[in-house]
Image (cartoon, rainbow, N blue to C red):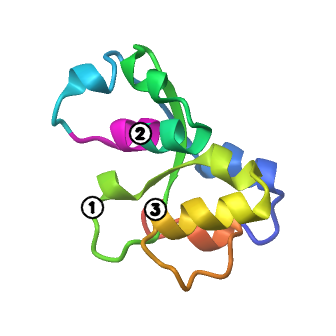
């Protein structure tokens, strides 16, 4: 579960990179891990114009929360793990739907059963 690996090794071996051929806006009501990741990345970066761009590359993990949620709803951009602690706390608590979350290490967030 990555305990003896560096962050870079965990990202290399367990993260996923997917590209979107269409923009998020052009995808309409479709659901996918790429769309979820792109929306979350746009919110995180504060760049809504990303949602209009085609060819967005989404670098993500599948999180272990929210419990019972589909894989599509559990995509978390890798970028959040490099943010300052308060920003990381805010976004992970929001995306994982867990206000009591107090550990923000990627190894604790990754859905190891998925991988």
Secondary structure of residue under mark 3: helix
Answer yes or no: is residue 54 visible. Answer: yes
The crowd level at tag 3 (other Cα within 10 Å; few <14, some 14-19, many 20+) is: some
Circles 2 and 1, Cβ within 8 Å, touching? The answer is: no
Q: Which of 77 and 52 lies nearest the eye of the viewer?
A: 52
- Looking at the rendered structure, which numbered label has been put on residue 6? none
The crowd level at tag 2 (other Cα within 10 Å; few <14, some 14-19, many 20+) is: many
Secondary structure of residue under mark 2: helix
State which region is magenta.
Answer: 31-38
- Looking at the rendered structure, which numbered label has been put on residue 39? 2
Q: Which of 32 and 42 lies nearest the eye of the viewer?
A: 42
Give whichever of discs 3 and 2 has the lower sequence position. Answer: 2
Answer yes or no: is residue 1 visible. Answer: no
Q: Which residue shows up at 58% across the image and 81% down it? A: 101
Q: Which residue shows up at 65% across the image and 51% down it? A: 80
Residue 61 pos. (x, y %) = 53, 52
Q: Is residue 46 above or below residue 104?
A: above
Q: Nearer the viewer, mark 3 or mark 1?
A: 3
Q: Is residue 45 left or right of residue 85?
A: left
The crowd level at tag 1 (other Cα within 10 Å; few <14, some 14-19, many 20+) is: few
- Looking at the rendered structure, which numbered label has been put on residue 95? 3
Q: Is residue 93 left or right of residue 37?
A: right
Classify residue 44 by image quadrant: top right
Q: Image quadrant for the N terminus?
A: bottom right
Q: CA distance from mark 2 to mark 1?
A: 16 Å
Q: CA distance from mark 3 to mark 2?
A: 11 Å
Q: Which residue shows up at 68% across the image and 48% down it? A: 11
Residue 6 pos. (x, y %) = 83, 57
Q: Nearer the viewer, mark 2 or mark 1?
A: 2
- Looking at the rendered structure, which numbered label has been put on residue 70? 1
Q: Is residue 5 left or right of residue 1?
A: right
Give whichever of discs 3 and 1 has the lower sequence position. Answer: 1
């Amino acid at each position: 579960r990555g305990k003896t690996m560096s962050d870079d090794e965990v990202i290399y071996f367990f993260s996923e990179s997917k590209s979107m051929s269409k923009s998020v806006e052009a995808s309409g009501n479709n659901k996918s891990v790429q769309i979820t990741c792109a929306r979350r990345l746009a919110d995180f970066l504060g760049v809504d114009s990303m949602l209009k761009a085609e060819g967005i590359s989404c670098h993500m993990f599948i999180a272990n929360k929210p419990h019972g949620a589909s894989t599509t709803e559990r995509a978390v951009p890798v970028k959040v793990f490099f943010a300052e602690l308060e920003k990381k706390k805010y976004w992970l608590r929001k995306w994982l739907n867990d206000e009591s979350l107090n550990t923000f290490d990627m190894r604790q967030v990754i859905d190891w059963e998925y991988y």
